[in-house]
Image (tube, rainbow, N blue to C red):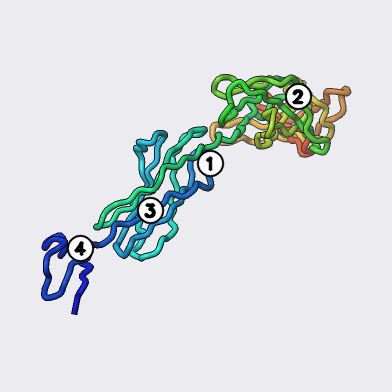
Amino acid sequence: MRISWALPGVCALLGAGALLGAGASCAQAAAPSAQTGGASSVGYASATVHGSVNAHGESTGFVFQYGTRRSYGEQSSLAPAGGGTHAVHVSATLTGLQPLTRYHYRILATSAAGAAAGADRTFTTGPVPLSLAIAGVPNPVVFGAAFLVEGTLSGTGAANHPVQLQANAFPYTAGFQPVGNTELTNSGGGFSFSYVGLLGNAQLRVVAVGKPEVASPVITEGVAVRVAFHVRHTHRRGYARLYGTVAPAEVGALVGFQLLRPRRSVNEGGTVVKAGTATVSRFGRVVKVRPGVYRALVKISDGAHVSAYSRAVLIR
């Protein structure tokens, strides 16, 4: 009887034509075969590459070699392709790629019987999507003061890109409207809009002009009422008149007087805001006082503005 051996270790030791016994011969194991497939899910920093491997009965591993030239220079982690006798589909996800770059790649399969490489193929990564981040500085802003809307446009083409500031004023039902002129980002994608005269709380966003249109997350810029606070001594010992103005007019808002202490503030009474002029409301009350530093807190609850403290005043 004639016996055929599939033992590459024995073949290597005895030689391909050695007699193993009466009527026996040594059969060499076949090297794997491999074919490079296409690429899918190609983004700006990653891509999935595909291929097929026939192990021809030997335990086989595979990698994908890749790089910006046909000399490659990088490769995926070694992965198993099994030891079957039929072609199997394999794939690997390549990461850390550069945007807008053409990459060469191929599959390489190896086993104890040899190695096989697939044909060279290419794919081109896409651009980094544009994205926006913004902040109001300061936030909240005191009524009548200027503030900045600062931010950064990131992604491919972010430099010297037109951007537009938009606002949606309280009660946020009118929709976003352009504010001022379109500006260009700097070489790093940064920008800054100066906003003067915001009358009340508003939602803000910045839009990158062009296709596709990209908008920043919406921020809410608060407008704190401007509180002027004064003290006038009275003829009654230990009492003083605490008074001031609030702009814009916030008739009915609560006012609290606070005596500032190192560890905590002490409430020393309060009042409500009353009508004054069309743009400024007033408050005032005679209260019993102690020597120390006082301030007024105007509490706003209508959503149009933000509560605010006055400057501190010393009472001797």
Of the two numbered discs 1 and 4 on the same chain, state the one appearing first in sequence.
4
In this figure, which residue is indicated by the disc labeled 1? 43
Instruction: Single out the mark in the foreground, 1 or 2.
Output: 1
In this figure, which residue is indicated by the disc labeled 2? 179
Give the residue type at disc 1.
Gly
Of the two numbered discs 3 and 2 on the same chain, state the one appearing first in sequence.
3
Q: Please, what secondary structure does the residue beneath circle 2 have?
A: loop
- Residue shown at 65% from the left, 29% from the top: 139
Q: Does residue 38 sit above or below 202 in this rendering?
A: below
Instruction: Single out the mark in the foreground, 4 or 2.
Output: 4
- Residue shown at 73% from the left, 34% from the top: 203
Q: Please, what secondary structure does the residue beneath circle 3 have?
A: strand
Seen in the image, is 198 located left or right of residue 215? right
Marks 4/3: CA–CA distance: 21 Å
Q: Does residue 134 sit above or below 123 in this rendering?
A: above
Q: Is residue 233 visible?
A: no
Q: Please, what secondary structure does the residue beneath circle 4 have?
A: helix
Of the two numbered discs 3 and 1 on the same chain, state the one appearing first in sequence.
3
Residue 265, image x, y percentages: 61, 35
